Amino acid sequence: LLFHCAHAWGPHVATHVSSIRRPPLASHSSVVLNVNDGAQTCEAAAEPDAASTQCVTVMKRGHERIGDGRRFGMVKPTDKLVSEQIDLEAFEVEYEHAVLLLKTGRYDGALALFGKLSKLNPGDGRVWQRMMAIYKRLRRFQSAERVIRAGLKACPGNAMLQQALADLLRERKRYTEARTHLRRALQLDPQLLSAYDSWGRMEAALGRHKLAESLFQRGLAIKPTTRLYHALGVLQDTVGQADAARATLRAGLDLPGEQDNPQLLHALGMVEVRAGNAHKARERFMAAIGANPSFTMAYLSLGRLEEKHGRYDAAARHYAAGAPRLQPGRR
C-alpha cells in the first residue's frame, strides 16, 4: 500500500530514494493514511471552514445561520450564546491572523490566539481543529486530545469534531475508542463521506477486510468519490481480487474530470505489478507521471519495477527524476 499510496492523498515532501526502506515490490503498505496531519482530519479531509464545522452561528449583526444545522448539530437560535456578543468580521480577521501564525510556524502565538477565539465563540469547530493540529505537530498528543474533547463539549453535535477525535485515537492505536467516535460521527451525519473512508482504512489496516469493504461501499452508495474508489480498489487488490480492483479503480477514473487522476492510475499500476503484468504496470505508472509530473510515488514504483527486471540504468533514471519532487495535493 506504500506504493498504492493510501497516504498519497495528502501533501508530502519528497524523500530521496536512498533513504527509503524498501518493502517487496508488489506488496501493500500497512500504513494508514495520517489524515490529521497539519490542520486536517480525514474527513475533515479538507481545510476546516465555517460552513462545515460551526455549531454556533447567531452573530451580533444578525447574520443568518451558517451551514446546515440538521447536519452539523448547530444549537437552536434561541439559545444564549457567547457569539451573540461578538463581531463576525472581527472574529474572522483574528482567525485568519491565527492561521497565518500557524502556517509560519509560530505555534505559541497561534495557540494563544486560537485559545482566545475559542472563548469568544466556543462553537466554531475550526478553532478546536486548528489547536488540535498544532499540538499534534508538536507531538503533544495528550494536549491534542484534551483540546478536541473541549471542542466536543462546546459543540457535541459536530460530526466532524467527532471524527477528528476518532482519527487522533486511531493514530494512538486506541481502536475501540476510535470506532465509538466514528460511529457517533455517522449517527450525527450519515452522509459524512470522510468518516466512511477513515473508518474503512482503519479496519483494512487491522485486517478486517469485510468490514472495511462494507464501509467503503456505504460511502460510495451515498456519493461516488475518487478517494473511496481508490481505497476500495486498493483493498480488493490486497485480498487478491485483481479484476474487481481494476473495475473499481476504472470507475473512479470514469468520474467527471478524473480520467487523469494520478493516484488512481498509480493504483492500477500496482494491480498490474501484483498480477505480474510488467508492461501494463509500466504504462500505468508513466500515465500517472504524465498526469502529474510531481508524483514521487509513481517514479519510485517505476524505478522498482525496472530494477526488479534488471534494467538498472532505467531504474536509476526514474529514482533520480522522482527524488526532489513533491507529492500531488489532496484531491
Image: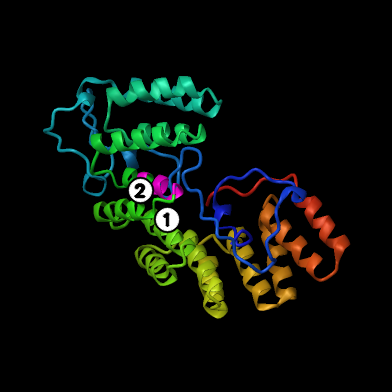
x, y percent for residue 203: 42, 62
Residue at x-position 41% and y-position 72%: 210
The answer for how far apart the CA atoms under marks 2 and 1 are is 8 Å
128 with respect to 104 (left or right):
left
Regarding residue 254, the answer to whether it shows in the image is no
- Report if residue 239 lies within the magenta region: no
6 with respect to 182 (left or right):
right
x, y percent for residue 168: 41, 45
Category of crowding for the residue at label 2, using alpha-carbon neighbours closer than 10 angstroms: few (below 14), some (14–19), many (at least 20): many
Residue at x-position 36% and y-position 52%: 178
* Amino acid type shown at disc 2: Gln
Dot 2: element? helix
Mark number, residue 102: none
**Magenta stretch, main secondary structure class:** helix
The stretch of residues the image draws in magenta is: 165-172
Residue at x-position 65% and y-position 78%: 275
Dot 1: element? helix
Say which of 216 and 205 sits in front. Answer: 205
**Image quadrant assignment for residue 234:** bottom right
Say which of 197 and 179 sits in front. Answer: 179
User: Which quadrant of the figure contains the N terminus?
Assistant: bottom right
Mark 2 near mark 1, Cβ–Cβ under 8 Å?
yes
143 with respect to 14 (left or right):
left
* Amino acid type shown at disc 1: Ser
4 with respect to 322 (left or right):
left
x, y percent for residue 260: 61, 61
x, y percent for residue 293: 71, 52
Which residue matches tag 2?
Answer: 163
Which residue matches tag 1?
Answer: 198
Among the two numbered marks 2 and 1 on one chain, the one whose residue lies closer to the N terminus: 2
Say which of 185 and 287 sits in front. Answer: 185
Category of crowding for the residue at label 1, using alpha-carbon neighbours closer than 10 angstroms: few (below 14), some (14–19), many (at least 20): many
